[in-house]
Amino acid sequence: MLNENTANLIGVKTTGRIFIKTLSKNPGGLSTIVDIAKTLVKKNEVAISSELKERLSLKKGQKVDVDLSPAPKSLAFIKKKMNGEMLSQKEVNEIIKDVVDNSLSEAEIALFISSMYEKGMNMKETIYLINAIFHSGKTLKLNLKNKLIADKHSIGGIPGNRTTPIVVSICAAAGLIMPKSSSRAITAPAGTADVIETIAKVEFSVKELEKIVKKVGACLIWGGSLEIVPADEKIISIEKMLNIDPEAQLLASIMSKKLASGAKYILIDIPYGKTAKVSKEKALGLKKKFEFLGKHFNKKMKVVLTRGDEPIGNGIGPVLEITDIIKVLKQDENRPLDLENKSLYLSGELLELTGKAEKGQGIKLAKQILECGKAFEKFKEIIKAQKGTLDHLKTAKFKKNILVKRNCQIIGFDNKKINYLGRITGCPMDKSAGLYLYRHVGDKLKKGEKIITIYTESKSRLREAIEFYKSQKPIIVKNN
């Protein structure tokens, strides 16, 4: 950021580019997008992000040279992809470098994402993208000899489906090391990081994270705070605005995180369905691609396809989802059994993949760990290590119970509409907002029974959510 007078002197305008060069024996420099302010920055001073400060090894008060910068080379490579041409490793590296250096505007990054979405990337390009994103940041150095480091990831798209905290707790209690970093929500009402943030810190430095994992054997943190694959988080922030998630970026995002975590064993969950992120046919294609990438990067990987025809769990939204998680871990009699069963299945697969359980015995071991309370104890250890507490969970200020007008049976859900309805309530920014589902597919309801409760922090959002629910009918019922 530059003072307005300094910017006029250089001849640069807001969102223009400047080149910052260090004045030292071994000068470094980079091109970056600039903001201009009248009072926040003094004349002949430049304010930079902590990220740029670290990349240029700068100290407060150090002198730098600032001048106009030409358009980055990567713009030509983005245009090349827009035309449907294949990119080289060098060209992809240049694009990702400019994303991290803030040399590309949000609009230019959006063009790159859109070109991946429209034109696609072959497997060679996807590997180039994984390499570039992986090398854009730091990696975890846990130095845990003779320990099995494992990770799991879902491609998302299903409302609720918050299996990760349960799987991490079960598997860590079984002795696996689970350094789990997650994204915030892209198109859903909540991501794992948004959910855990309701009860604990999710932003840590790499050194802090390493201490947590060495102490309790696992973590549940936001990947964007770690300077691990920073390019990925910047791309995800633009994907949120565009509401798209290109396949190549999805593959690269997941694989680069797993490479950076140091995990040797990786479980990938691909939910499929009519209103899921992918159809069964596309899920099978993704499975093959993940398996190919697992072999390429020398990882022991298991890819499972799971049904994604309806939301999993009862709560949708950060506070409501963490409530479901705690109920499962505490073995509360009102816990959502669909969430528990899927979590046990995924845990079992990971325990078998790592050799912690014999083939066919994974679910049995996972169930024992959950039912005896070890998983809940491990979860509490993780939350405590992340400076959290399980107290003080509250739902939003305003709510509306939706009742059925006649005897009926639920025959389906539109996941995309449920996700959109969740976003209308204010999720994930309003952590206490969201939806609570009382029934699932096949369940029968009598006239006057609750089918869903909508929670919001404002009356206007509540009105909008009710209107959307009534007009779009995200829950499909038939009269009995």
Image: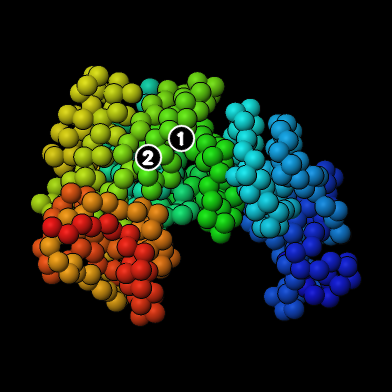
Placement of 407 over or under 335, stated as above or below: below
Q: Indicate the secondary structure of the residue bearing disc 2.
A: strand
Is 421 displayed left or right of 395 in the figure? right
Q: Is residue 422 visible?
A: yes
Q: What residue is rendered at 71% in x and 44% in y?
A: 82
Mark 1 surroundings within 10 Å by alpha-carbon count, few (fewer than 14), some (14 through 19), many (20 or more):
few
Give residue 170's position: percent from left, percent from top: 25, 37
Q: What residue is rendered at 23% in x and 57% in y?
A: 477
Q: Mark 2 points at which residue?
A: 272
The amino acid beneath tag 2 is Tyr
The amino acid beneath tag 1 is Lys
Give residue 160's position: percent from left, percent from top: 32, 52
Q: Indicate the secondary structure of the residue bearing disc 1.
A: helix
Q: What residue is rendered at 13% in x and 57% in y?
A: 480
The span from disc 1 to disc 2 (Cα, nearest Å) is: 8 Å
Q: Name the residue under label 1.
A: 282
Which of marks 2 and 1 precedes in the sequence?
2
- Viewport quadrant of the N terminus: bottom right
